[in-house]
């Protein structure tokens, strides 16, 4: 899990008095998009819980099938095969994710860019081989990147990709899928729920008797093992962390993150993490990637311009951990462990 984890919440079984049914906690995990997706929900009805969980996981699985850049049969990959050709009619889901991706690319001046795939591929190979990408190959890959090479027609629901364009939705898909799963749970009558696609978390109404869901903010060092010292308390919000904590490549003593700056084609270096709270999962996920590329100063500016969004930057410097936040972030934080 990257960055955030749903804090351990005691399995509350509440009697709501007067013979009301017992509200219980249900939890399940399935692997999709190469990551563990965890669903936690509260309901008094066993059958509803099972049915809703099944429907939510099925929704995530179908998004995985549409958006994957690992599966050559996915709708995304089939679209990429047609780059340079005429516009292609795509599913509502793919069109929606692409529209949101292009919108974030525009707002972030291309710091988030869904056409980053050719460069990301070179960095995946670098991670495997332990060798930096060859500069000429990298320059060619960079020349294929640019969100303006995507033409969307919202009426016809078509997408046209300029020649050589390849898409990577890895910076938005998990947040989008967590959000889609919460919508399905709500449609099945369940509002007290949390869906965590690895570190891309979307929460609905809080658990019974609580003000919100407690989500731990992992410290920069050893995020997998050290206990969070701070918790966000959230309801009907999304939160996502981008950081170099788990996915990076170290070559010649330098750590390169799997987040790439589209302007340079280089993986981010230095120990940083960005946690973003937003109104929806796709925004939180794409925004943490964009803010991570932009760095604290421009990143905070971007987050402040987006309704309902807050962010925390953590950076390791020679003088220790540097912490920069948007003005409203601290109000969401509870300093001690949740009850
Ligand atoms: P995760 O939650 O898996 O850590 P992030 O939200 O941090 O993912 O996004 C990282 C992923 O986004 C990368 O693995 C890559 O697929 C993609 N990516 C990397 N750099 C960019 C970028 N500048 N714009 C858009 N997507 C990116
Ligand atoms: Mg992201």
Image (spheres, helix red, strand yellow):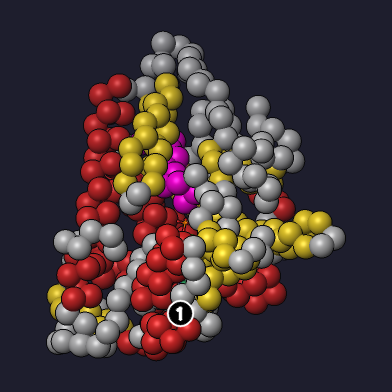
Q: Nearer the viewer, residue 216 or 82?
A: 82
Q: Does label 1 point to a residue whose CB lies under 8 Å from ligand 1?
A: no
Image quarter (top left, top right, bottom left or bottom right) of the C terminus: top right
Is residue 191 a member of the stretch shown in magenta?
A: yes
Q: Is residue 74 above or below residue 47?
A: below
**Residue for badge 1:** 134
Q: Residue at x 33, y 41 (%)?
A: 31
Against 80, residue 178 (above or below) is above
Magenta stretch: give its range.
Answer: 190-201
User: In percent of the image, x 69 and y 33: which residue is there?
Assistant: 337
The front one of 104 and 296 is 296
Residue 299 spot, x, y in % from top left: 62, 72
User: Which residue ends up furthest to the right in the rendered image?
Assistant: 319
User: Nearest the camera: 280 or 98?
Assistant: 98
**Residue 60 pos. (x, y %):** 29, 48
Q: Is residue 93 left or right of residue 291?
A: left
Residue 195, quarter of picture: top left
How many marks can you see? 1
Could you tell me which residue is drawn at 45 percent across and 46 percent down? 198
């Amino acid at each position: 899990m990257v960055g955030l984890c749903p804090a351990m919440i005691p399995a509350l079984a509440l009697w709501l008095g007067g013979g009301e049914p017992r509200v219980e906690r249900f939890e399940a995990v399935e692997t999709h998009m190469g990551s563990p997706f965890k669903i936690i929900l509260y309901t008094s009805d066993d059958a509803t819980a099972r049915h809703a969980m099944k429907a939510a996981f099925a929704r995530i699985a179908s998004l995985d099938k549409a958006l994957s850049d690992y599966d050559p049969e996915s709708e995304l990959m089939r679209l990429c095969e047609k780059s340079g050709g005429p516009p292609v009619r795509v599913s509502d889901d793919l069109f929606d994710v692409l529209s949101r991706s292009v919108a974030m690319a525009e707002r972030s001046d291309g710091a988030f860019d869904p056409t980053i795939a050719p460069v990301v591929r070179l960095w995946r190979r670098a991670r495997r081989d332990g060798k930096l990408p060859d500069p000429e190959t990298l320059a060619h890959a960079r020349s294929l990147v640019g969100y303006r090479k995507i033409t969307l027609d919202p009426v016809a629901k078509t997408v046209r990709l300029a020649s050589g364009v390849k898409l990577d939705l890895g910076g938005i898909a998990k947040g989008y899928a967590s959000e889609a799963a919460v919508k399905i749970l709500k449609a099945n009558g369940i509002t007290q729920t949390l869906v965590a696609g690895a570190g891309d978390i979307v929460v609905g109404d809080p658990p019974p008797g609580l003000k919100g869901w407690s989500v731990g903010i992992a410290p920069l060092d050893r995020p997998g093992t050290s206990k969070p010292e701070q918790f966000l308390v959230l309801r009907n919000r999304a939160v996502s962390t981008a950081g170099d904590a788990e996915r990076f490549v170290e070559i010649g003593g330098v750590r390169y993150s799997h987040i790439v700056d589209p302007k340079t084609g280089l993986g981010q270096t230095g120990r940083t993490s960005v946690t973003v709270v937003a109104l929806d999962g796709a925004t939180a996920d794409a925004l943490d990637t964009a803010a991570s590329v932009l760095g604290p100063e421009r990143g905070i500016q971007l987050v402040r311009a987006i309704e309902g969004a807050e962010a925390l930057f953590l950076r390791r410097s020679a003088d220790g951990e540097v912490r920069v936040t948007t003005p409203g972030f601290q109000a969401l934080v509870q300093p001690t462990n949740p009850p």
